[in-house]
Image: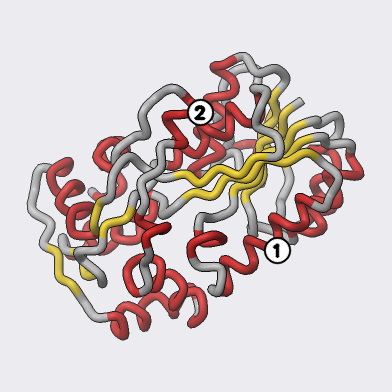
Amino acid sequence: MILVTGATGNIGRALVKELAASGAGPLRGLTRDTGRAAFPEGVEAVEGDLARTATLKPALEGVRSLFLVSRVGPDAEIIDAAGQAGVEHVVLVSSITVETHPHLGPAGENAAVERLLRDSGMAWTILRPTQFASNALWWAGEIREHGTVRAPYAEVGLPTIHPADIAAVARFALAEPGHRGRTYPLTGPERITARQQVETIAAVLGREVPFTEIGRQEAHRGMAAFLGDEAADAVLDVTGGDVNDELITVRDTVARITGSPARTFRQWASENAAAFT
C-alpha cells in the first residue's frame, strides 16, 4: 500500500493520478476532507491531518511506502508514527536550498527533517526541488484585481519547476526499484525570470499584464505580513537577493528519471490560466 499525504495539493494531486495510471498497486490518498476529494477510481480516500499526528494512525495501517512533504506538520512525530506503523520507505519533498542556502532558517529546518528520516531506520528518497512554477499564484489576486504585477528581482532567472514533475519523479521513487537512499535535486528545463513569467501569463491570457519592478524593502513589507520576517527574507534571498551557481543550475534529473523532458513554465501557465482571470 502506498499512502500519498497532501493528496489534494499541487504535488499530491498529480502524484495520485500518476500512481493510479501506472498501476502501482493499492493506493491511498490522505486529505482533511474526503467529501471534497476527487480521486481516480480505485484510490482509497482517507481522512487525516498532518498537523494532528493522532489522526494518521488509520491512514498508515498497512502502508509500506509513504509520500511526505517536509514542514507541513510535526515531522518528528509523523516520521515516528510511520516507523511504528511498519512503513518501509518514505519519499520526502525537501528543498534545493538545503544545498544552495544551508544558512537560511527554512533550509536548516528542511535539513533537520532530512536527518530525522535518514536516522529513522526506514528506507528513504529525498527530493529537493527548486522554486515551484505554482509560486506564480502569489500574483493571481493582483492580476485579477489590478491587471498588473509588482515584484522584485525582475531579471533574475531561476529554473522553475512544474509541481507535476516533482510528482512524476516521486512516482518512480515510490513504485520503481533503484531510488532508495538517493537524493535528487529537481529543476525545470530552463531559467525564467519573474518578468518572463508575467509575460508568459499575459500571452496565455491574451492580454497585457504590465510588470513593475519594486525594491527588496517594499517586497519584504508585503511578504512579511503573511510569511513573517525570517521567511520573507529567505524567500527574497533565494528569488534574487542571494543567488549562486548551484541555485540557477538547470538539472536533467526529471528527464533522466522519468524519460520525459521537464515541463516548461508556459505549460504550467496554460494549465492554470483560469486562476488569473
Quarter-of-image position of residue 139: bottom left
Residue 257 rendering spot, x and y as whole percentages: 50, 28
Residue 175, label in figure: none
Residue 257, label in figure: 2
Q: Residue at label 1?
A: 112
- Quadrant that contains the N terminus: top right
Which element is circle 2 on? helix
Residue 152 rendering spot, x and y as whole percentages: 26, 72
Q: Could you tell me which residue is drawn at 39 percent across and 41 percent down?
A: 162
For residue 31, say whether it is visible: no
Q: Amino acid at mark 2?
A: Ile
Q: Could you tell me which residue is drawn at 42 percent across and 57 percent down?
A: 246
Position above or below: 213 against 32: below
Q: In front: 137, or 164?
A: 164
Label 2 and label 1: CA atoms lie apart by 26 Å
Q: Amino acid at mark 1?
A: Ala
